[in-house]
Amino acid sequence: MQHPVTMLAPIKLAAGKTEADLMAASNRFQSEFVDKEPGVLRRELVRKPDGTYLDIVQFRSIEDVADITEKEKK
């Protein structure tokens, strides 16, 4: 039996980058990578009160986490 796994990825803007830059990169990552991965059930990028961000990703299983993490490295 597979159990969904939720991963939290904290994000801090790099020097010289804006929220608009992050949103553009996030949208590109979503359309070019995430949307093509059946192991990703849901992804949401949120802004925290301290000005940092959190990428919340729900995967179908821990095996999907491992598989997709390897693909992201390429």
Image: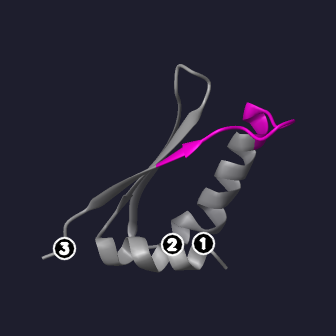
Other-residue count near label 1 (Cα within 10 Å), few / some / many at <14 / 14–19 / ≥20: few
Marks 3 and 2, the one that precedes in the sequence: 3
Q: Which image quadrant for residue 53? A: top right
Residue extent of the magenta highlight = 9-21
Q: Are marks 1 and 2 in contact (CB under 8 Å)?
A: yes
Helix, strand or loop status at disc 1: helix
Q: In the image, is 62 to the left or to the right of 55?
A: left
Mark 3 and mark 2: Cα distance apart in space: 18 Å
Residue density around tag 3, few if under 14, some if 14–19, many if 20 or more, within 10 Å: few
Please state which amino acid type lies under the numbered disc 1. Glu
Left or right, 30 with reference to 25? left
Furthest-top residue in view?
A: 49
Name the amino acid type tagged 2: Thr
Residue with the mark numbered 3 = 2
Q: Residues within 10 Å of mark 2 (few under 14, many from 20)?
A: few
Q: Quadrant of residue 22?
A: top right
Asked if residue 31 lies left or right of residue 17, the reply is: left
Instruction: Identify the residue position indicated by label 2 in the image.
Output: 69
